[in-house]
Image (cartoon, helix red, strand yellow):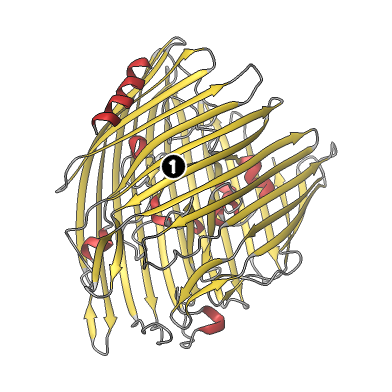
């Protein structure tokens, strides 16, 4: 720790004030995110135009995202070969992962409509020095739409060949120096091919105002869902011996407020939030196959998180930018349920915990075109030892208008999930936090004023991983896993053409005798090409692909899933200045593949829609 602290302290004391980025990214406090990060704004989200953020983010560099079980199954999003619960998901700066679910964390992205999102920033790497617990492999930072300076709104409706519908609308009303934005979305789709479906209803409200040099904001979000799918690992519609489907109902609620000083060298900020996740799940039994049977179970779970953060930023001209602050988190979870072992066994639990943290970060430019950033954080979780984490980063532009090289070292930790600590049949209160460290280096070149090409190498080590041990029939800490790889991405804007491409290679080393990790293809990539005309017509082509990967299910045991490449096409045509129509073809060549055992991908699907902007 002495060496790590010396490195971080030296960077903090050396420590330019980089201009604050145009995007708001909670994964950094005094500098823009590294070139390895991906930022998608509302224009990008509208161009890709998927009904689910899971589908949208699957095209980002280093991201593996899909639904396990079809349309109504649980979502899976992992960064650089980590588990889904290794990623901290932030919504308006509030941590929204759920540590009471059976996956031990993560956030169900299908609860959010891309129509109501302003920006998504994906920042890979261990980031606990900035965000505290949860950020073992990175951060997904989601910002909702905010009021504009003029009265405006939009309505859209899309319908697909599965009989699905996606309806969305927003209204923005300026009031003084701020305003109010209201938004709603209704999504309903059932796939006969997957025997899986999802209904989602979502509402958001955003209010902004100014009190002198202080920007005030308030957010309210409510998302309700009702879904059905074959249980995870059951073998899906193709292989499940028990043809009953899992039924899930639930909701997610977020209330958040913030106050941020926007002027002056010394700028304080305050953020507070409360979120609640409710989930009622009825899972049928999975009959025995290559693996043992899994009994039927029910659960009714509620999880609440209260969070407050206070920070102050000081910009000393162009030589120093420093941020420091503290945070508090309280988490409570309670559940009632039963497991059918031939006799009904109750699985109720009620658990809570708190943690406080303090942090500091600084960025400096000691010589022209060289930026150094250092972060240090101490978290003090209830009933556990204090956790220190560090991050150092450097970016050097080799020549004016030339390439930039960048490198970083970062640490992460993650507290045991409330599920692992409290679920009666599996609980182990002696679990240690999971840990990670990441080295990253790369080179990036701007092309003109907007385009960029980036190549990144990373190496991440995970230790004390929490896993279920069937011999002890409880959760235990296991040996570590190493992941390393390279990512190449290009964001090119060439006149009327927009081209976004990614390709990544991943190598995962597990301890001897340990089976290969699931859903980690060695190669994956995406390509998005669009062409816009002056009359408003826009045509786009999108490719998404991955190589073979290991998976498993109760009927099959461990097996390998084939690789795939899918092609989507889309067109948007204006009818008037305000009215437009659009059409899409998903999986244009009807590629046959599975992203989880026994769940066939949706075949070729057409959708048509219309919208109005006013």
Image location (x, y in percent) of residue 385: 16, 44
What secondary structure is marked by label 1?
Answer: loop
Residue positioned most to the top: 317
Q: Nearer the viewer, residue 266 or 598?
A: 598
Q: Quadrant of residue 480?
A: bottom left
Image location (x, y in percent) of residue 606: 74, 65
Image location (x, y in percent) of residue 611: 71, 50
Q: Nearer the viewer, residue 156 or 458?
A: 458
Tell me which residue sits at (58%, 26%) in the image: 404
Is 538 drawn above or below residue 599 in the view shown?
above
Image location (x, y in percent) of residue 190: 59, 72
Residue positioned most to the front: 512
Q: Nearer the viewer, residue 554 or 382?
A: 554
Is residue 492 shown left or right of residue 421? right
Tell me which residue sits at (39%, 82%) in the image: 291
Look at the image and tell me whether residue 138 can be seen: no
Residue positioned most to the bottom: 342
Is 408 drawn above or below residue 565 in the view shown?
above
Tell me which residue sits at (53%, 36%) in the image: 146
Is residue 583 shown left or right of residue 396? right
Q: Which residue matches tag 1?
A: 125
- Quarter of the picture containing the N terminus is top left
């Amino acid at each position: 720790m002495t060496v790590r602290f010396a490195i971080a302290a030296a960077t903090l004391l050396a420590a330019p004030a980089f201009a604050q980025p145009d995007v708001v990214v909670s994964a950094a406090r005094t500098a823009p995110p590294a070139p390895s990060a991906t930022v998608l704004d509302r224009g990008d989200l509208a161009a890709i135009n998927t009904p689910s953020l899971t589908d949208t983010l699957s095209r980002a560099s280093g991201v593996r995202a899909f639904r396990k079980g079809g349309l109504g199954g649980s979502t899976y999003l992992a960064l650089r070969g980590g588990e889904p619960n290794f990623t901290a998901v932030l919504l308006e700066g509030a941590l929204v992962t759920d540590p009471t679910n059976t996956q031990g964390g993560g956030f169900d992205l299908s609860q959010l409509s891309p129509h109501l999102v302003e920006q998504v920033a994906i920042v890979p790497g261990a980031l606990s020095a900035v965000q505290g617990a949860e950020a073992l492999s990175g951060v997904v930072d989601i910002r909702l739409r905010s009021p504009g300076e003029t009265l405006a709104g939009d309505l859209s409706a899309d319908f697909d060949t599965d009989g699905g519908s996606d309806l969305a609308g927003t209204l923005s009303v300026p009031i003084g120096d701020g305003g109010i934005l209201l938004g709603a979305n209704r999504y309903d789709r059932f796939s006969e091919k997957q025997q899986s479906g999802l209904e989602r209803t979502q509402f958001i409200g955003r209010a902004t105002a100014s009190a002198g040099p202080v920007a005030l904001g308030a957010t309210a979000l409510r998302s309700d869902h009702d879904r059905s799918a074959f249980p995870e690992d059951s073998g899906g519609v193709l292989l499940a011996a028990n043809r009953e489907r899992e039924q899930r109902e639930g909701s997610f609620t977020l209330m958040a407020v913030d106050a941020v000083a926007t002027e002056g060298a010394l700028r304080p900020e305050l953020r507070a939030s409360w979120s609640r996740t409710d989930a009622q799940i009825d899972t049928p039994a999975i009959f025995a196959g290559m693996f043992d049977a899994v009994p039927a179970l029910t659960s009714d779970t509620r999880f609440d998180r209260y969070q407050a953060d206070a920070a102050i930023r000081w910009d000393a001209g162009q030589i120093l930018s420093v941020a420091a602050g503290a945070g508090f988190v309280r988490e409570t979870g309670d559940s009632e349920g039963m497991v059918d072992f031939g006799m009904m066994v109750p699985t109720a639990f009620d658990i809570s915990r708190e943690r406080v943290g303090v942090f500091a970060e600084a960025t400096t430019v000691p010589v022209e075109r060289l930026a150094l950033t250092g972060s240090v954080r101490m978290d003090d979780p209830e009933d556990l030892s204090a956790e220190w984490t560090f991050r150092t980063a450097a970016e050097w532009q080799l020549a004016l208008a030339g390439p930039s090289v960048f490198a970083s070292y970062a640490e992460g930790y993650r507290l045991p999930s409330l599920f692992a600590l409290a679920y009666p049949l599996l609980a182990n209160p002696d679990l240690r936090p999971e840990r990670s460290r990441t080295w990253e280096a790369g080179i990036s070149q701007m092309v003109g004023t907007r385009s960029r090409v980036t190549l990144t190498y990373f190496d991440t080590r995970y230790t004390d991983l929490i896993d279920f041990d069937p011999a002890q029939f409880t959760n235990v800490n296991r040996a570590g896993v190493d992941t390393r790889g390279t990512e190449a991405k290009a964001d090119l804007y060439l006149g009327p053409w927009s081209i976004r491409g990614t390709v990544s290679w991943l190598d995962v080393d597990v301890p001897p005798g340990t089976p290969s990790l699931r859903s980690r293809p060695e190669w994956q990539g995406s390509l998005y090409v669009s062409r816009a005309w002056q009359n408003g017509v826009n045509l786009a082509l999108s490719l998404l692909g991955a190589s073979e990967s290991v998976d498993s299910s109760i009927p099959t045991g461990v097996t390998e899933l084939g690789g795939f490449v899918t092609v989507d096409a889309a067109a948007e045509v204006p009818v008037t200045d305000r009215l437009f129509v659009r059409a899409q073809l998903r999986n244009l060549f009807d590629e046959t593949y599975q992203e989880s055992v026994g769940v066939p991908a949706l075949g070729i699907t057409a959708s048509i829609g219309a919208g109005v902007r006013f």
